[in-house]
């Protein structure tokens, strides 16, 4: 956990590393941008040939760096193990001529790698392992993985040596910032992801602008705020426009999984001239979603990255669905999935997990609204996977949907859906919003990154695999249902684990999740 002194030290270390890597934290030099554009143009030409043929040779360099705000991330339990979430992409090795280079801050224990490789359908583990290169910085400091890579030229040389043909290789990342752009240029690789120059459209402020351009309903509020006085004014104006509003949400532009959100309760607020001063006095007492967040640190973050103010949407029955899209290098927009997000925290804004697909009564509605926003993003040059989050309130027999956020990166819904695809070889039907196996059978799942308990601590990856084997907690390829674990590295130290439960219905998937939790609770307390 970060104190203010430790947080400042982490910022200093990252600044030093990125500076040593030739990137000083401001806008990258123009030649780097031009080089990346040329690499991306090459990617557009080779994309169809490489991706349409599962037997075509290619190399995927996976950079699971969470290049996000360090202090916000530090409040997520076991966050450095989130680099493991992209291990789902190891299942790309089912394509017999695909090579993978997977980069991490610290080495991933071999039992975890074995666990994933044994999930591969139809490919001998030895064959897959020979096409997998694992490289680590051996550095557990609280600094973005990409920053660590950039100041290790010998390690980058080993990455280059692991790529037999640059013309058929690309880089994929959790999110793409200027750091990842610099890394791509150093390696001579295109990125299957969004150009950092477009990242504003994935901020909280940029999202609101996209929603307006696409003609999608969004909460009342204001964006592009930075100074404390701007937030005070915006909160006062929101109350004036919505006199009956009870709460407002303040959000950091680059918040992650809801950790950058805070609630202002208007209870007891005066009317008229005294409102602004009342709000000013209340700001230090905001209800922060992030653990141990303080107003001093939050105010610093607001000034540095900016943020928004939105009305807190009330409703007796509320859901938080999201819809995912992909824009490929040729500019084609494809709906990928819909989910109902499982949220927790003080006011239900922290991402805990998800259910797939979203509720049948509205999943096509949010997909259609999201599709409009996705086309606006594609027209601006956005590339890769992204998600659009909604807040949905039931009004009688109807649902009202408010678009609240665009995530121009992979997220908590990405890895479970990719695992479903890889394990079943099925596909998403955008006409119905359902997922079908090759035999035409529907599949649903319940996934969480936060199966967490104090008594799980001390269980090693080998212990988990033993527990899973003894209790039948595995994915059964014959009936195409079962349980798959992720974030396995976080289990022993943090008592935290990710789990994906796949079944033919929501009820079956949730029953598998409950059984998994019951078994882990029993085994975790066994002496």
Image (spheres, rainbow, N blue to C red):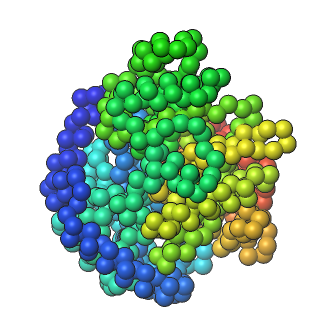
Viewer-proximal residue among 130 and 155: 155
User: In the rendered image, which quarter contains the N terminus?
Assistant: top left
Q: Relative to residue 421, is residue 448 depicted above or below?
A: above
Percent across and percent down for residue 97 are 46, 84
* Residue 440 visible in rendering: yes
Q: Relative to residue 292, is residue 355 depicted above or below?
A: below
Viewer-proximal residue among 250 and 103: 250
Specify the farthest residue to the front: 273
Residue for point 68% across, 71% down: 427
Residue for point 32% across, 35% down: 303
Specify the farthest residue to the right: 397
Res 34 quadrant in image: bottom left
Question: How many marks can you see?
Answer: 0
Along the horizontal axis of the image, is 97 left or right of 436? left
Percent across and percent down for residue 65 are 37, 55
Res 285 quadrant in image: top left
Along the horizontal axis of the image, is 432 left or right of 208? right
Residue for point 85% across, 42% down: 397
Percent across and percent down for residue 288 are 47, 27
Percent across and percent down for residue 107 are 34, 56
* Residue 156 visible in rendering: no
Residue for point 49% across, 38% down: 222
Viewer-proximal residue among 330 and 427: 330
User: In the rendered image, which quarter contains the C terminus?
Assistant: top right
């Amino acid at each position: 956990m970060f104190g203010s002194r430790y947080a400042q030290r982490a910022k200093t270390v990252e600044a030093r590393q990125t500076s040593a890597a030739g990137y000083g934290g401001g806008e990258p030099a123009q030649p780097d941008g031009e080089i990346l554009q040329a690499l991306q143009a090459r990617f557009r030409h080779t994309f169809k040939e490489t991706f349409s043929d599962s037997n075509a040779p290619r190399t995927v360099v996976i950079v699971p760096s969470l290049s996000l705000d360090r202090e916000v991330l530090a409040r997520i339990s076991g966050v450095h193990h989130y680099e493991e979430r992209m291990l789902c992409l190891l299942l790309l090795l089912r394509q017999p001529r695909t090579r993978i280079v997977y980069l991490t801050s610290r080495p991933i224990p071999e039992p975890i790698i074995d666990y994933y490789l044994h999930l591969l359908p139809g490919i001998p583990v030895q064959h897959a392992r020979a096409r997998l290169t694992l490289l680590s910085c051996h550095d557990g400091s609280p600094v973005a993985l990409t920053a660590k890579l950039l100041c290790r030229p010998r390690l980058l040389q080993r990455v280059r040596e692991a790529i037999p043909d640059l013309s058929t290789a690309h880089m994929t990342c959790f999110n793409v910032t200027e750091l990842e752009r610099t890394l791509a240029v150093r390696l001579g690789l295109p990125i299957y992801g969004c150009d950092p120059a477009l990242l504003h459209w994935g901020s909280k402020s940029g999202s609101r602008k996209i929603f307006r351009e696409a003609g999608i309903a969004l909460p009342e509020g204001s964006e592009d705020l930075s100074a404390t006085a701007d937030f005070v004014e915006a909160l006062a104006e929101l109350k004036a426009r919505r006199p009956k509003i009870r709460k407002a949400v303040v959000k950091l532009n680059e918040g992650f999984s809801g950790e950058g959100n805070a609630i202002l309760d208007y209870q007891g607020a005066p009317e008229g001239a005294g409102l602004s001063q009342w709000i000013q006095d209340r700001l230090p007492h905001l209800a922060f979603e992030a653990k141990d967040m303080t107003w001093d640190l939050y105010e610093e973050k607001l000034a540095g990255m900016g943020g928004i103010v939105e009305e807190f949407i009330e409703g007796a029955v509320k859901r938080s669905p999201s819809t995912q899209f992909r824009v490929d290098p040729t500019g084609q927009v494809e709906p990928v999935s819909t989910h109902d997000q499982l949220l927790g925290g003080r006011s239900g804004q922290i991402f805990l997990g998800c259910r797939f697909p979203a509720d049948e009564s509205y999943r096509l509605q949010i997909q259609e609204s999201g599709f409009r926003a996705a086309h606006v993003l594609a027209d601006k040059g956005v590339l890769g996977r992204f998600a659009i989050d909604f807040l949905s309130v039931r009004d009688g027999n109807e649902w009202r949907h408010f678009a609240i956020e665009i995530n121009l990166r992979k997220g908590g819904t990405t890895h479970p859906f990719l695992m479903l695809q890889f394990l079943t070889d099925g596909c998403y039907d955008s006409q119905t919003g359902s997922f079908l196996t090759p035999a035409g059978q529907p599949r649903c799942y319940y996934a969480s990154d936060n199966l967490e308990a104090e008594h799980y601590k001390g269980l090693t990856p080998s212990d988990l695999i033993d527990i899973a084997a003894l209790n039948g907690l595995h994915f059964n390829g014959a009936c195409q249902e079962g349980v798959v674990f992720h974030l396995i590295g976080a289990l022993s130290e943090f008592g935290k684990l990710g789990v994906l439960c796949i079944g033919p219905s929501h009820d079956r998937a949730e029953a598998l999740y409950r059984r998994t939790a019951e078994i882990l609770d029993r085994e975790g307390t066994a002496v």
